[in-house]
Each structure stands twice: as structure tokens, then as C-alpha cells.
Image (tube, grey):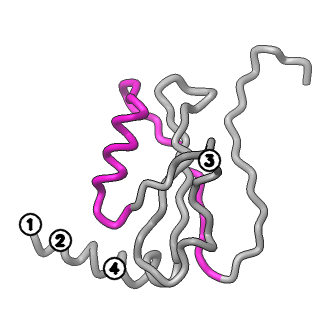
């Protein structure tokens, strides 16, 4: 395209999986977040497992997340397009977590109020 100033932030994954889905999420905040703070927040979040060390080939993969309720979160990095953006990669069992467990956890949260 010959556009040296064009910034593109993309994720492409093609893997056949029996179960578990993966999602690439772009988070854009009002203020620039520190990546270490984001990692710490994910590590403390109920139902999430920080799985983020790409240099050692440790990142979420659908094969790791089947038959459990935990969502693996990793590949946390700066968005190349938006200075307040962060890209996150998540994998989780869409039947257990994506349907059943989420419904129960949302109901529990609503009952707390």
C-alpha cells in the first residue's frame, strides 16, 4: 500500500479445535495503562489465569482450556494504532465457561446487590 504512516494492529490465528474458543480483544481506555498493572489485575481476577510469557512460548491456547471454567489471558501488549489501546488474547471453554458458568456467575453478582 506504500503508506509508511499506516499503523495496523492485527491478530490472525488458524487452528482446528474440538472445544474452547479464542478471542482477540482490543481495550481502549481514557488514560494509558501500565502493562504490568494490567497483568496484575488479570492475575487477581476471579475466573482468570494470567498465562503471559511469549518469549518462552507461554500464551493461551484453546487446547489448554477445555473442560474447565478458567479463562486464560495472555499476549498482553500495546496496540499499535491507539496509544491508549491494549491487545489481549483469551482462551476458554465455550460450553463450560462461555455458557453455563457465566450465567451462574452473573446471577450470583446480581443477587449480591
Of the numbered discs 2 and 3, the one sitting upstream in the chain is 3
Give the residues drawn in magenta, as a range. Answer: 19-48
Crowdedness of circle 4 by 10 Å Cα count: few (<14), some, many (20+)?
few
Secondary structure category for the residue under label 4: helix
Q: Is residue 51 left or right of residue 13?
A: left
Secondary structure category for the residue under label 3: helix
Residue corresponding to mark 3: 56
Residue shown at the point (49%, 55%) measured from the top left: 51
Residue corresponding to mark 4: 103
| Nearest the eye: 37 or 83 | 37
**Which of label 1 and label 3 is nearer to you?**
3
Does the CB distance between marks 2 and 1 fall below 8 Å? Answer: yes
Q: Which mark is residue 113?
A: 1
Spatial separation of the CA atoms under disc 2 and disc 3: 40 Å
- Residue found at the far top of this picture: 4
Q: Which mark is residue 110?
A: 2
Amino acid at each position: 500500500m506504500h503508506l509508511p504512516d499506516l499503523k495496523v494492529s492485527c491478530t490472525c490465528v488458524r487452528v482446528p479445535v474440538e472445544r474452547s474458543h479464542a478471542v482477540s480483544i482490543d481495550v481502549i481506555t481514557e488514560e494509558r495503562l501500565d502493562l504490568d498493572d494490567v497483568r496484575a489485575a488479570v492475575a487477581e481476577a476471579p475466573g482468570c489465569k494470567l498465562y503471559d510469557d511469549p518469549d518462552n512460548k507461554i500464551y493461551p491456547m484453546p487446547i489448554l482450556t477445555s473442560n474447565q471454567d478458567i479463562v486464560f489471558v495472555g499476549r498482553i501488549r500495546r496496540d499499535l494504532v491507539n496509544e491508549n489501546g491494549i491487545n489481549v488474547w483469551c482462551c476458554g471453554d465455550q460450553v463450560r465457561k462461555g455458557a453455563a458458568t457465566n450465567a451462574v456467575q452473573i446471577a450470583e453478582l446480581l443477587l449480591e446487590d
